[in-house]
Amino acid sequence: MDEQYYEKLMNIKTSGEQKIFNESLHYNRYEPTSYTALEILSEQYTFTAEDSIVDFGCGKGRFVFYINHFFSSAMTGIEMNKFFYTESVDNKRNYFKINKNKTDNIHFLNSFAEKYKINPSDNKFYFFNPFSVQIFAKVIKNILVSYEEYERIVDIILYYPSDDYIYFLETSTPFLLINEIKVSYLYDNDNRHSFLIYRLGYR
């Protein structure tokens, strides 16, 4: 399905290129995950209504709305850029105009990722290279502290993963790689077009 189909289906606007650039070199430009990639992820990885998922660097909220629409997962989007945060809030209002029967379990915060206090119910965390590995490390530390306080299965979902993120997770944390989901139509030309799923807390 193309972008227009999903944007119309959910009554949101998440397409377009970034026109505002961050002053800090620690934060990367906005780029939404393609809907085709999200289709592939959701076909090969399980999301449920019991999940509480955090999208760090959520931009205009595409991942948030897609997962909520199809799986009813509780979603939290963290966005440090005030413009994109406002866009995501506008999208939420429009989304619920045509999803009146859905539970409002979507929340957006205009905050730095490392300042977000991990909720004990948060169990899945999505990253599409939103910031530097230094900030990533701080966020992962916060997740690990939360895990120590409330043990549960915790998944880290990386899309188009940077080598720095991978190296940090595999050498400095107890997370283990459990799956690689390739975005087939792009992977042959660039093998970073994949989702890596890291897990902590096997049962």
Image (cartoon, rainbow, N blue to C red):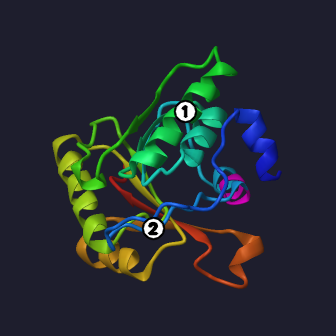
Res 174 visible: no
Which residue in the protein does label 2 denote?
129
Residues rendered magenta in the picture: 36-40
- Kindly identify the amino acid type of the residue bearing the numbered disc 1: Asp
Q: Secondary structure at mark 1?
A: helix
Picture disc at residue 90: 1
**145 above or below 49?**
below
Q: Secondary structure at mark 2?
A: loop
Judging depth in this view, the residue of 185 and 4 nearest the camera is 4
Picture disc at residue 19: none
* Residue drawn 74% across the image and 58% down it: 36
Give residue 155's position: percent from left, percent from top: 41, 54
Q: Residues within 10 Å of mark 2 (few under 14, many from 20)?
A: many
Judging depth in this view, the residue of 134 and 85 nearest the camera is 85
Give residue 92's position: percent from left, percent from top: 55, 31
**91 above or below 143?**
above
Overall secondary structure of the magenta section: helix
Give residue 119's position: percent from left, percent from top: 28, 37
Q: CA distance from mark 2 to mark 1?
A: 24 Å
